[in-house]
């Protein structure tokens, strides 16, 4: 059981097919405009696919062809949506907000109130029952909204960036709460935060330009990213190229030895990943030879920016992290040449899959 969806909506460039297993939490990641919220809207019944079908625990949510066909109304789908904003009824107390859903399906008042109190407790919001939304902080309101979403006892919980509007200090608390609440529930969570994918999801889907371009367990997808968006989430440099001998040849003349060169021979492009910390930086022609375990890559510096307690140096599409002291000593300037010394032992390589969403950034 669980969810199966395939949906095409050309007007928004959407063409997706995926499933969510019973009790599974799937994270949907992707750059702005990739179509994540549209997928959530398709499932919630707020937007209709031109073609495709979706089934949730044996119930057909929609079955459409050429813009026509059946589509269950939102309230009959067995889905609940928790969005960025809590969107509570301002004139009702927290408890009344949560009881509203059960009440509107005919549950008697006392029973709905008892259920609301139970769900508020489940969302760590029992103490807020009597408060009006205007008296709640953003984090408190979002906990009440979570209780309201759970009170519908959905077959699939849809979460569209549920922590994006919270103050940063509230996020870890909400993440812990979601981890507890999502355990064993079928859920799809849209997020920009890699930590959400790692801590909340059993599986991640990466969307790009309306399509799912990567899918797998979070640690696996982040360890072997297939496209630049996923690599940047994982904090890794990603280089795609062809193999010649034991070396990877990439665009712009970039070339270095890779450990699994054999995997790329039959015309299959190879991907190589390594962290920014694997690159040391020096001025061109600096005195002394590089460590033999390091490849010397000539680059033009394109950007310098602070990154935590390091300075990130960009060049040739790569990022190197060096200490502020090293940066001061090198006095690098954007537009000037530098040498990136890549620690070959930090490079991992693997074949590229046929990823329709690949773009060089
Ligand atoms: N209400 C709408 N009407 C028409 N087109 C829309 C609407 N909302 C979004 N789109 C378009 O659909 C595409 C997908 O947008 P969507 O909001 O689903 O992406 P997203 O991945 O959720 O982005 P973000 O991370 O910025 O929220 C984009 O091209 C967008 O411009």
Image: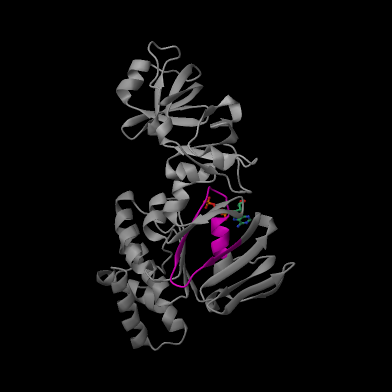
Confirm whether the magenta stretch covers residue 29.
yes
Residue 20 against residue 263 in the figure, above or below: below
Instruction: Identify the image's colour scheme: rainbow, by chain, secondary structure or one colour.
Output: one colour
Relative placement, left or right, of 169 versus 353 is: left
The structure residue drawn at horizontal position 41% and vertical position 50%, both measured from the top left corner, is: 194
Camera sees residue 260: yes
Farthest right residue in view:
66
Residue 149 against residue 9 in the figure, above or below: below
Location of residue 86 by image quarter: bottom left
Location of residue 323 by image quarter: top left
Relative placement, left or right, of 88 versus 48 is: left
Farthest left residue in view:
127
Camera sees residue 237: no
Confirm whether the magenta stretch covers residue 237.
no
Q: Quadrant of ligand 1?
A: bottom right
The structure residue drawn at horizontal position 45% and vertical position 52%, both measured from the top left corner, is: 220
Front-most of 352 and 125?
352
Residue 124 x %, y %: 28, 68
The structure residue drawn at horizontal position 60% and vertical position 30%, both measured from the top left corner, is: 251
Residue 114 x %, y %: 31, 83
Residue 108 against residue 177 in the figure, above or below: below
Residue 61 x %, y %: 59, 75
Residue 29 against residue 337 in the figure, above or below: below
Front-most of 148 and 71?
71
The structure residue drawn at horizontal position 47% and vertical position 73%, both measured from the top left corner, is: 22
Q: Which residues are magenta?
A: 17-41
Residue 119 x %, y %: 33, 75
């Amino acid at each position: 059981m669980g969810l199966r969806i395939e949906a095409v909506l050309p007007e928004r460039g959407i063409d997706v097919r995926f499933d969510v297993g019973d009790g599974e939490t799937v994270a949907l990641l992707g750059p702005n405009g990739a179509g994540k919220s549209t997928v959530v809207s398709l499932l919630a019944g707020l937007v209709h696919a031109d073609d495709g079908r979706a089934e949730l625990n044996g119930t057909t949510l929609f079955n459409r062809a050429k813009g026509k066909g059946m589509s269950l109304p939102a309230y009959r789908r067995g889905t609940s949506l928790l969005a960025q904003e809590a969107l509570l009824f301002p004139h009702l107390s927290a408890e009344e907000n949560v009881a509203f859903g059960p009440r509107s399906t005919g549950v008697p008042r006392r029973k709905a109130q008892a259920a609301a109190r139970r769900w508020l407790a489940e969302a760590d919001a029992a103490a807020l029952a009597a408060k009006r939304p205007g008296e709640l902080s953003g984090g408190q309101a979002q906990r009440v909204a979570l209780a309201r979403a759970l009170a519908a006892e959905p077959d699939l919980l849809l979460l569209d960036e549920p922590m994006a509007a919270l103050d940063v200090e509230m996020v870890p608390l909400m993440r812990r709460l979601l981890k507890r609440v999502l355990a064993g529930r079928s859920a799809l969570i849209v997020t920009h935060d890699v930590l959400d994918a790692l801590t909340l999801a059993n599986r991640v889907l990466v969307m790009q330009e309306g399509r799912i371009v990567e899918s797998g367990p979070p640690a696996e997808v982040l360890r072997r990213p297939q496209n630049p968006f996923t690599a940047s989430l994982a904090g890794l440099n990603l280089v795609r190229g062809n193999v010649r001998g034991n070396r990877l040849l990439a665009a712009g003349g970039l070339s270095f030895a890779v450990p699994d060169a054999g995997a790329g021979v039959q015309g299959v492009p190879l991907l190589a990943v390594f962290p920014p910390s694997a690159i040391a930086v020096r001025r061109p022609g600096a005195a002394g030879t590089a460590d033999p375990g390091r490849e010397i890559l000539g680059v033009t510096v394109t950007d310098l920016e602070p990154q935590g307690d390091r300075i990130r140096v960009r060049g040739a599409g790569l990022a190197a992290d060096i200490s502020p002291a090293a940066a001061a000593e090198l006095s690098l300037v954007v537009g000037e040449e530098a040498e990136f010394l890549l620690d070959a032992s930090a490079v991992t390589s693997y074949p590229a899959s046929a990823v329709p969403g690949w773009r060089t950034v």
